Amino acid sequence: MNLISLEKNPEIKINQKLEKFLNPDCIEIPFENMINIQKKYVYKDETIFNNTKSTISGIIKGYKKYCNKNKILHTLFIENDFREMTENKKVKPDKIDIKNLIKILKDNNELNLYQKLVNNNLIKNIVISAINDEPYVYNNIIILKENIKEILELIDELGIYFKADNIYLIVKNNEANIINDCLNELGTYPNIKLTLVNDEYLLGRKEFIFEKLKLDSNSEYWLIEEIYNMTKYIFGKDNTTKIITISGDAIESGKVLEVKKYCLLDEIIKKYIKINEPHLIIVNGLMGGYEISDSAKLIITDEIFSINIMKKAKIKDSECIKCGKCISICPIKINPLEKSDYHKCIDCGLCSYICPANINLRKFIKDSGEKNE
């Protein structure tokens, strides 16, 4: 396995102190099938439809349109009244009960987390990753820093519940401040092994970190964000927010933000971000993300973890020079120009990253693969 450290852009600066945007003027909740909401007012954390909950208290104003990956869907538009009222108060338990957590996750339709916890197979190793693979994204490491006590408590209980031999907490070795915080707390949890890895692209993916640690299939993998989401149910934390990173070379300084789910990107930018240049916006990472044309139509859903606001590049692509760099750098050694290999692509973007002709090979593979389906 030959992984690389991605080149850093010195113009991209990020303040890694968590900031909060918890009072949006409105939210827009997307839905696929047409719904008919009779009520005029909703409470924060109240279920509206299909297990979807409102993240603010406010007045239902009607329906709008929503853009996701250039597809137009519909949304329920709710205007914030800034009262932050809730229907039910959450009670913090004296002790973590994994069996009760399983029931809570199922009741709240958190099926991915639920399925991991009801896994009855032998689990020898538990791997908890605080890595975000995409460059200039710090969500997982900031979540760990801000909530380290509750996270370590839950990780330790998971180890006991699954009778795991090893628990690995994975952190990049260049995250000095976070490492110190971990060391200060880990003395209470001797079963958790702080494991430092180089800042190499793709170590944030399960298969690559398992290969790095030489782990077998009797291992379970969680991101810190998943552990954090479970602690919200356990400790009665606000479950209406999520963490995102906004960065780029077209802004003065990037930020890590806790924001309300379903708020609008445009409102966040207007309140927090000063854009200096003609720019483009890339959602979910420079390596594996996608460009959007209008920030006003992007909603921060659970799937969105980062926004890059980048200068419009003046670089032009040219003809392929047959250098073979794209094949050499590919972690699974496919040829981007060989159509039979498209189904093997893991969509990491390294071929585009290394191409001296500036060809967007990742897009070429994706577009060609869709045509062949």
Image (cartoon, rainbow, N blue to C red):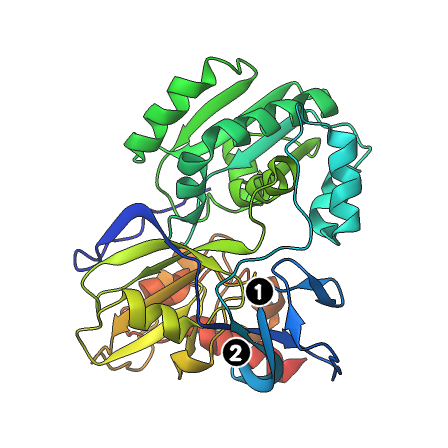
Q: Residue at x 49, y 73 (%)?
A: 26
Q: Residue at x 41, y 25 (%)?
A: 182
Image coordinates of residue 365 in percent, x first then y, are 51, 74
Q: Quadrant of the C terminus?
A: bottom right
Placement of 206 over or under 357, stated as above or below:
above
Residue hosting label 2? 69
Tell me the amino acid under the disc marked 1. Ser
Residue hosting label 1? 57
Asked whether the viewer can see residue 104, the reply is yes
Which of the pair 75/115 is nearer the observer? 75
Residue depth check, mark 2 versus mark 1: number of the one nearer the observer: 1
Image coordinates of residue 331 in percent, x first then y, are 47, 52
Which of the pair 184/192 is nearer the observer? 184
User: Helix, strand, or loop for circle 2?
Assistant: loop
Tell me the amino acid under the disc marked 2. Lys
Task: Decide which of tag 2 and tag 1 comes sooner along the chain.
Answer: 1
Number of numbered discs visible in the structure rendering: 2
Image coordinates of residue 103 in percent, x first then y, are 80, 41
Q: Residue furthest right?
A: 120
Mark 1 closeness class: few <14, some 14–19, many ≥20 residues within 10 Å:
many
Tell me where residue 220 sits by quadrant: top right
Q: Is residue 318 left or right of residue 170?
A: left
